[in-house]
């Protein structure tokens, strides 16, 4: 693995879509990352694309060998829903008073989620990751085997070196671009979301959603789509709450 390129990727890459989008979603890190070859392909493609902060989700994933989320493949009669992305799509569709059945969610994932340019700007999305490297789970850490970088010798060392830098940068992005809505997903990371927003959250027990706003941006902290008990209705409810502030 090219450690110099890996270091640059960690310092530069933040996610997918367009900072001008009204809907921003911020998670802890991407999934995947089971195989070294997968990360090598990712780094190579990112470098060939110019080493940007934001990629186009559809174009990037298709280029690194995961087109099934956007393109109809042989022997399949539809695209594959990605479980986390599907609920983010559902939130935007509900918030903007659109249908949010499975067909509509697949269409949104395929055409609009995390796109650099969007034919419907009012439904544009920006997907950011607090940490840059994909990992199958919080309990997995493969990079110490794949890289000689000291920062990657453990997940703890990785977080220690990057979290404060990336929190500050995401804060600056929000302050500069002033998105209408920022949705943090994964309540395990609530302390990080609090740092980014700089505003106390109000927890709504009935909805299991935390909210705050600074007069410009409305912040929502919600369950991760993979969390137990968080079905479609939960994310539709998030969308309904967001619709009230649009």
Image (spheres, rainbow, N blue to C red):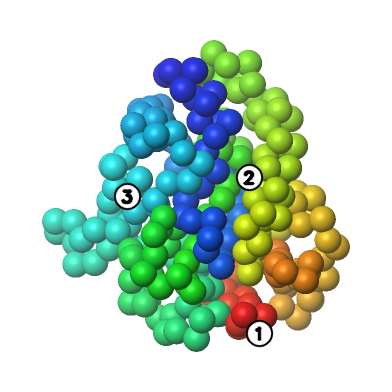
Position of residue 239 measured from the top left corner of the image (x, y, whole percent) = 58, 78
Instruction: Give the mark nearer the N terminus: 3 vs 1.
Output: 3
Tell me if residue 41 can be seen: no
Tell me if residue 24 can be seen: yes
Q: Residue at x 46, y 61 (%)?
A: 85
Q: CA distance from mark 1 to mark 2?
A: 27 Å
Kind of element beneath mark 1: loop
Instruction: Give the mark nearer the N terminus: 1 vs 2.
Output: 2
Give the vertical position of 86 relative to 176 (above or below). Answer: below
Of 169 and 105, nearer the camera is 169
Q: CA distance from mark 3 to mark 2?
A: 21 Å
The label number, if any, that marks residue 130 in the structure image:
2
Give the vertical position of 50 relative to 233 (above or below). Answer: above
State yes or no: discs 1 and 2 in contact (Cβ < 8 Å).
no
Q: Residue furthest left?
A: 74
Position of residue 146 measured from the top left corner of the image (x, y, whole percent) = 48, 20
Which corner quadrant holds the C terminus?
bottom right
Position of residue 172 measured from the top left corner of the image (x, y, whole percent) = 70, 48
Position of residue 76 measured from the top left corner of the image (x, y, whole percent) = 19, 62
Kind of element beneath mark 2: loop
At label 1, counting other C-alpha atoms closer than 10 Å, the crowd grade (few under 14, some 14-19, many 20 or more) is few
At label 2, counting other C-alpha atoms closer than 10 Å, the crowd grade (few under 14, some 14-19, many 20 or more) is many
The label number, if any, that marks residue 244 in the structure image:
1
Which corner quadrant holds the N terminus?
top left
Q: Residue furthest top?
A: 148
The label number, if any, that marks residue 59 in the structure image:
3
State yes or no: discs 3 and 2 in contact (Cβ < 8 Å).
no
Q: Left or right of 180: which side holds 111?
A: left
Q: CA distance from mark 3 to mark 1?
A: 33 Å
């Amino acid at each position: 693995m090219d450690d110099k390129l890996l270091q640059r990727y960690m310092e530069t890459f933040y996610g997918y879509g367009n900072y001008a989008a009204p809907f921003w979603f911020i998670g802890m890190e991407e999934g995947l990352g089971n195989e070294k070859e997968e990360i090598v392909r990712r780094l190579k493609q990112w470098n060939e694309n110019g080493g940007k902060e934001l990629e186009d989700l559809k174009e990037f994933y298709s280029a690194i060998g995961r087109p099934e989320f956007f393109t109809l493949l042989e022997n399949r009669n539809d695209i594959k829903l990605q479980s986390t992305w599907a609920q983010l799509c559902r939130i935007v569709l509900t918030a903007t008073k659109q249908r949010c059945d499975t067909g509509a969610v697949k269409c949104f994932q395929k055409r609009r989620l995390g796109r650099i340019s969007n034919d419907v700007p009012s439904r544009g999305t920006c997907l950011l990751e607090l940490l840059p490297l994909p990992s199958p789970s919080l309990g997995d850490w493969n990079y110490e085997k794949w890289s000689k970088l000291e920062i990657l010798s453990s997940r703890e060392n990785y977080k220690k070196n990057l979290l404060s830098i990336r929190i500050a940068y995401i804060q600056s992005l929000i302050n500069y671009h002033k998105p209408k809505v920022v949705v943090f997903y994964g309540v395990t990371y609530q302390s990080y979301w609090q740092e980014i927003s700089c505003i106390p959250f109000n927890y709504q027990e009935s909805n299991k959603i935390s909210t705050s706003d600074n007069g410009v941006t409305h912040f929502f902290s919600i369950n991760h789509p993979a969390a137990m008990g968080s079905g479609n209705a939960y994310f539709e409810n998030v969308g309904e709450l967001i619709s009230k502030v649009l």
